[in-house]
Amino acid sequence: MNKYGIGLIGCGTVGSGLIRNLAKANPLLRERLDIHLEIVAAAVKDITKVRDGLPVKPIADWRKVIADPAVQIVVELVGGVDDSFQIAQTCLKAGKPLVTANKALLAERGHELIAQAHQSNAPIYFEASVAGGIPVIKVLREGLVANQLLGLHGIINGTSNYILTRMAEAGSDFATALQQAKDLGYAEADDRLDVDGIDAAHKAAILCLLAYGFLPKFSEVPVEGIRKISSQDVSFAAQLGYTIKLLALVRPHGSDQVEVRVAPTLLPNRHPMASVHGAFNAIGLLGNLSGPVQLTGRGAGPDATSSALLADLAEAAKNLRDKSPGPQIPQPDGKLRLLQKGESVGRFYVRLEVEDRPGVLALVAGIFGSEKIGISSVLQPEGHGAGSVPLVFLLEAASESSLEKAVAQITKLPNSRSPAHILRVEDLS
Amino acid sequence: MNKYGIGLIGCGTVGSGLIRNLAKANPLLRERLDIHLEIVAAAVKDITKVRDGLPVKPIADWRKVIADPAVQIVVELVGGVDDSFQIAQTCLKAGKPLVTANKALLAERGHELIAQAHQSNAPIYFEASVAGGIPVIKVLREGLVANQLLGLHGIINGTSNYILTRMAEAGSDFATALQQAKDLGYAEADDRLDVDGIDAAHKAAILCLLAYGFLPKFSEVPVEGIRKISSQDVSFAAQLGYTIKLLALVRPHGSDQVEVRVAPTLLPNRHPMASVHGAFNAIGLLGNLSGPVQLTGRGAGPDATSSALLADLAEAAKNLRDKSPGPQIPQPDGKLRLLQKGESVGRFYVRLEVEDRPGVLALVAGIFGSEKIGISSVLQPEGHGAGSVPLVFLLEAASESSLEKAVAQITKLPNSRSPAHILRVEDLS
């Protein structure tokens, strides 16, 4: 039997889950791969805290863990971007394989790490960084290796999906649904990464890197979260036959541009992605040969994340055993650029609040017409008595810039009562 | 760049698709893995037939293809069980990696091939044998390698799913829907493998092998097809909130038994598997760590199958490059046995045709009660005037043997007008 020494750096919820599940998994890994994984060193911030099941005495200095000759594979679970970057870089420089669940690290400093990995000939394994329970990295990198990816999209933040599901099913408003997510442990006290779309954008950037060999400059990725979604939008979308999801989308345009964005998006109810409920994640991949593939499962939680970390550890060990170089991350070649905001063409949902008097609908519709934007449906509920009514448009495909022009004109109308609420619509045929 | 010589044996629809798609995929494989695949020898039945894009002159004798020193990987695409077994065995004996799309071969003669593969230290790659466009073999074997599988189920025959979808959506009867499937090229002239559940059972056996290291004796696997499904059943199921799917199911019972079966099954409409429509396939895997994972995509067609074959070829080439032994198929250890018919416990749908007179419902319900089978819903539409009425029961969990006893008693009632129609119900929570 082949034994492999693991160095664990960071031991919060995910790390504790890994320790617990490693004990369960070892008999299976032995049977299936003739591999035994053993944590032989660990570094944590607070060395006085007791960690159940950790077979070694943790130390504070992670450099010693990486340098330990018994450590053959390093698992980085400290999170964040700064310390974890130092850890990852040191690990790769030492020529040791790195296993990480850190999406922010890869999305924001992936360029440097990939260069380091190539230079040191050390692999990075990061299945746990995107949609823990779903082996999407492996599917993208290996299962669909012979496919040109025509696009991908996903619901890759469980917290937001839980909140949107509550809003749709229970009619809750955003604040109530967010509180429920917090009460159930689906949302962190600091909810910004999840609710404002940043976590989903980190994952989208990683998927983009694998699909297109292109890691966008993270600060330039257009990201919108779900804080602005009202229960009114959820209900209007439902009346139009759509469900609102926080959708991450990666799509090539021509041979030199890639669209990457995260935004709350109306999906037709009949699309399989529209029925991915609660904290579940789903990723749709469109291969030129495979056709559409959808993977659905748990995106987070210590067990689902352990499933991914252990698969990576097993693969890292197997590659060490076989003296195989391990998976190569494509080195971005600089030919591709991010589709700029305004260049994007798509369908939109526009909710207005206008003066409740005859002729206003015609006025607004006329402005869309003058910008050559077709209207595919309109919804105007009965006025609610305050002298104003909501007016909801589902538009045909239009460029973001012509939409903006139209909306600016509409906003300037004396009949306009509040700023327009604009959401993306994707048919994902 | 690393070039690998492929020996192609068999060149029907799938083989022609592979030839065409190999040309498209090579630039991607070069970029992603620094690998170039080249067909250097081919054997076909009819050597006079022109094959577009085949870069070599095909020969009739497949043994020469395997023996050709330029051939490093053999692709077997002849189908069937007898010739393909000879080919596979000869290939493995020669120590060459085998890539196959042949589910019948693996399900029916896998024991011998696995033994040969272990003896010769030659790997078998068979991603294309189950649900072509969906990399389920890789997900099961590698992505979920650290998971104990608590069960798996799937819609893994596209033809049957197309037929059942037509029956549900257009209200067609079985014969009409089958004819449509044939007209569209979804069903073969000989429809038995698809429609009678055998193809799905072949795939279920392969999934069982990977999940549990147990390959059931194929002739003992309980298999029911969809020929017996009437449009009445489809409509009654819908009224009860269910959809009928040809479901393959693999589930461990205790430590020594595995249930493997294929049967038309009622699934609750809210389950994601119920909305897998048309010729699409889906597989649900329940890992103890990952939680439920569902993979949906195209199961068949030359392109989707090429996606899987090319992924296997790329992996075989990569393993040759790295001198890595390649994936090991678990060698069945004989501890497990197939759950016998009658031992299975489940929920059932029972449709009866009974005399239209007061008291009959009570009589039938009394028989279920005497066998301790709970009734979860009953449907009795208005009589259709012929003196008899359908009577539909959705039952609580019961053993197959007690159900059979109850149904035998019901059939003997003088009020019984035709044999009972029995279908499985799975909640797949």
Image: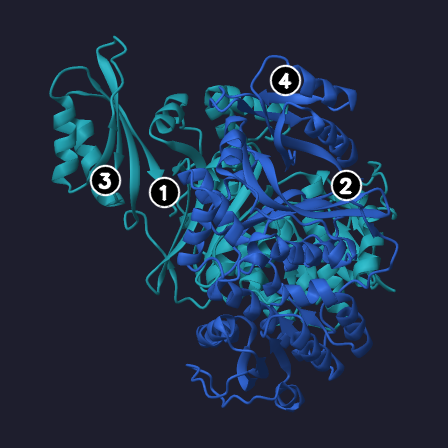
Chain colours: A blue, B cyan
Of residue B361 and residue A115, the one placed in the foreground of this image is A115
Amino acid type indicated by mark 2: Ser
Figure check: B139 above or below A282: below
To which residue does mark 1 refer?
Answer: B426
Of residue A321 and residue A224, the one placed in the foreground of this image is A224
Give the residue at x 77% y 44%: A341
Q: Which mark is residue B403?
A: 3
Mark 1 or mark 3, which is nearer the start of the sequence?
3
User: Taking the image as drawn, is residue B126 in sight?
Assistant: no
How many angstroms separate mark 3 from mark 2 (CA)?
49 Å
Tags 4 and 2 both on a single chain = no
Output the chain of dot 4: A
Amino acid type indicated by mark 4: Leu
Nearer the camera: disc 1 or disc 2: 1
Output the chain of dot 2: B
Judged left or right of residue B369, residue A255 is: right
How many angstroms separate mark 4 from mark 2 (CA)?
57 Å
To which residue does mark 4 refer?
Answer: A361
Give the total number of marks visible in the rendering.
Answer: 4
How many angstroms separate mark 1 from mark 2 (CA)?
39 Å
Figure check: B300 above or below B64: above
User: Taking the image as drawn, is residue A223 in sight?
Assistant: yes
| Mark 2, secondary structure of its residue | helix
Q: Quadrant of the N terminus of chain B?
A: bottom right
Residue A211 point in image, percent of width and height: 74, 53
Amino acid type indicated by mark 3: Leu
Badge 2: few (under 14), some or many (20 or more) residues near its Cα, within 10 Å? Answer: some
Output the chain of dot 1: B
Badge 4: few (under 14), some or many (20 or more) residues near its Cα, within 10 Å? Answer: some
Q: Which mark is residue B16?
A: 2
